[in-house]
Image (spheres, rainbow, N blue to C red):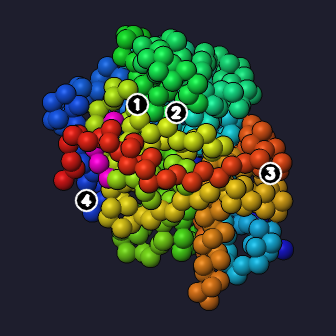
Amino acid sequence: MEQTKFLLDESQIPRRWYNVVADMPNPPQPVLHPGTGEPIGPDDLAPLFPMALILQEVSEEAEIAIPEEILDIYSLWRPTPLYRARRLEQAAGTKARIFYKYEGVSPPGSHKPNTAVAQAYYNKKEGRTRLSTETGAGQWGSALAFACKLIGLECKVYMVRISYDQKPFRRSMIQLWGAEVVASPSNDTRSGRAILEEFPDTPGSLGIAISEAVEDAAQRDDTSYSLGSVLNHVLLHQTVIGQEAIAQMELAGAFPDVVIGCVGGGSNFAGLAFPFIREKIAGREIDVLACEPAACPTLTRGVYAYDFGDTSKLTPLVAMHTLGHDFVPAPIHAGGLRYHGVAPLISQLVRDGLIRAEAYLQNDVFASAILFANTEGIIPAPESAHAIHGALRAARQADEAGEQRTILFNLSGHGHFDMAAYDNYLAGKLEDVALDEEEIARALRAIEGLPTPA
Ligand SMILES: Cc1ncc(COP(=O)(O)O)c(C=O)c1O
């Protein structure tokens, strides 16, 4: 019998996070102060984040030790399993070998607690008592609520309106773990009220929810802001995924030709891919593929520019692929992928040709999700299903090229709270959103006049 699961012992949880900045051929562009256009320093970020996280944000060290207290909480679900998807391979009729790393075994059901626990830990250590955050799909909000409960912090979650309505049980999870949750835009912040006044029926967006959470944190001394993706330190914390995967692929006697993840802000993708990009920079040949929704095609159709991380222009300016900070993506079911920008580290690596990207329509993605659920059994989160779809395409391309390739993708979470989306798909009610050039051009006008990256 061929082996299906490749498991590591608890003692093999990585002891260090890997910082890709140390190995990048070109460093990321500096983060700029929106008022002065000058690079910002650690002190500028101090009202929002604890200093330990700010120092990780600007670190150029290749490895950063993971504190024991964080490892202790990681041990509740880490190391996560790596599977060989033999039943999926058979059903797809491919010669490719497909492996997946499954992050859905964490208590909240995704990769998000890898950074939530770390962020809560450093905040607590520096005396903050409360965190504010946004959530798109509800996965991040529930992960941070979980982490705050275990570490002992209060938590307020601004949940994108469409997810708040579509996913009442994600809301309940956030409340069960003791956090407060409101639909965004909300009446609790100035930015939320301004948007509600202009667009009372808006489905919300991650950009809007970030504005609310940043405003909340900036106004209170006891509160830090916590972001579930995009920032360097968030991607750093996720690299436990790829480090474990390298060890598990070794157990399987294999190494991937193709490494794949879905991209919202970029954290699960980076978590799996960065340790492999370290190998790629060192000379190994690996195709690294980022998968995004056609309704929010940041990497494939956005421009590389300085832009705000949020809709109300409260954050510093970061150089990244963007669709413009006031772009509100159509309310597709992969709520966690509805972000106008992407992690600057990923953008830079795309520019340097170390990562490539593809965009998919949601009906195609759900068809792949159903094939996966019907063969491997796990019902994937709609976000993660983009990576499944990418893996099946990569397998087909390998077969067409007459090569047997090894494909590894990140199954970033389960979809147990996304059944309304599956209901819609099975009833044939899911709409594919064709984003036209005019809307992209309109949204990009929002960044006219901002500084241009070098
Ligand atoms: C299961 C899952 N996968 C992926 C994402 C996308 O985020 P990121 O690109 O930061 O991994 C989300 C975001 O909410 C998610 O819940």
Look at mark 1 in the image and give the residue it sits on: 311
Q: Residue at x 23, y 31 (%)?
A: 34
Q: Earlier in the sequence, mark 4 or mark 2?
A: 4
Instruction: Work out whether residue 18 or residue 300 is closer to the camera in this orientation and state it.
Output: 300
Q: Earlier in the sequence, mark 2 or mark 3?
A: 2
Q: In what element is the residue under mark 2? A: loop
Q: Earlier in the sequence, mark 1 or mark 4?
A: 4
Asked if residue 3 is positioned above or below residue 340 in the image, the reply reads below
Instruction: Work out whether residue 31 or residue 8 is closer to the camera in this orientation and state it.
Output: 31
Q: Residue at x 60, y 21 (%)?
A: 183
The segment highlighted magenta reads 304-308
Q: In the rendering, which numbered label is found on residue 26?
A: 4
Residue 244 x, y percent position in the rendering: 57, 56
Residue 156 x, y percent position in the rendering: 54, 18
Q: Amino acid at mark 4?
A: Asn
Q: Residues within 10 Å of mark 4 (few under 14, many from 20)?
A: few
Q: Amino acid at mark 2?
A: Ser
**Is 98 displayed left or right of 439 in the figure?**
right
Q: CA separation, marks 1 and 4?
A: 28 Å
Q: Amino acid at mark 3?
A: Gly
